[in-house]
Image: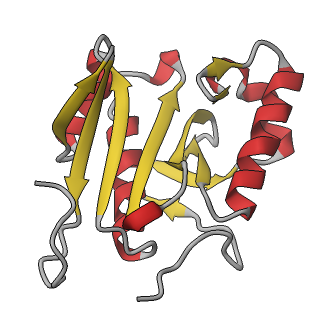
Amino acid sequence: MKTNRPPFTSFPILVNNRIILREVLESDYDQLIEISFYDGIQAKEIIDTKTMNERIRNDYLSGNSIHWLITSVTTGEVLGTGGFYRGFQNRIGEIGYVLKKVHQGKGYMTEALNLILNFGWEKLELLAIKGVTSTYNQASKNVLWKSGFKESETINDEVVFLISSPDKTQNKKSPVG
């Protein structure tokens, strides 16, 4: 079965009444230093953010990720980032996300994650999606639970969460039990 994978002809924009998920632009880099990560390493200055976002962009162009900037509909302010990372092997995607501290606890990430999940089901035609977070990151675990994820396993100090496609018409066995 052919599935849709990045890169797309035009970068997908996801919207609800409070947030817009759009492509990260170079003009956004100065607002991303505190929330830019690649391979678990956090940016310390704008050059790090630039390097990390170039790597993320190359992952997108290679078909292995899609990374959105999360902004406020009303103010345009950068709230965070999120997307799919590490490829789509066996039609399973892995989500990742980070929100600026000042915007945490306001429901933005749950809303963004739901937009990302719908994109994964509808456009990428994924069978399952996983999220990995620290056993100590209660806020992230809460976001995953609210979005319907179930704990799958704990490896060292990380918890792996999984959610299966809501499409009940698929004839394939679900990769999530």
Towards the viewer: 153 or 95 = 153
Viewport quadrant of the N terminus: bottom left
Residue 106 visible in image? yes
Does 7 sit left or right of 19 as displayed? right
Residue 50 occupies which quadrant of the picture?
A: top right
Residue 24 in the image: above or below residue 13: above
Residue at x 70%, y 75% (from the top left corner): 10
Residue 17 visible in image? no
Towards the viewer: 158 or 138 = 158
Residue 87 in the image: above or below residue 101: below
Residue 61 in the image: above or below residue 133: below
Viewport quadrant of the C terminus: bottom left
Q: Residue 40 location, x and y as percent? A: 59, 23
Residue at x 50%, y 62% (from the top left corner): 14
Image coloring type: secondary structure
Residue 147 occupies which quadrant of the picture?
A: top left
Q: Residue 44 location, x and y as percent? A: 77, 12
Residue at x 54%, y 56% (from the top left corner): 87
Towards the viewer: 137 or 58 = 58
Does 31 sit left or right of 72 as displayed? right
Residue 12 occupies which quadrant of the picture?
A: bottom right
Q: Residue 101 location, x and y as percent? A: 50, 16
Does 23 sit left or right of 105 as displayed? right
Residue extending furthest toward the right: 47
Q: Residue 141 location, x and y as percent? A: 26, 27
User: How many numbered circles does the render carry?
Assistant: 0
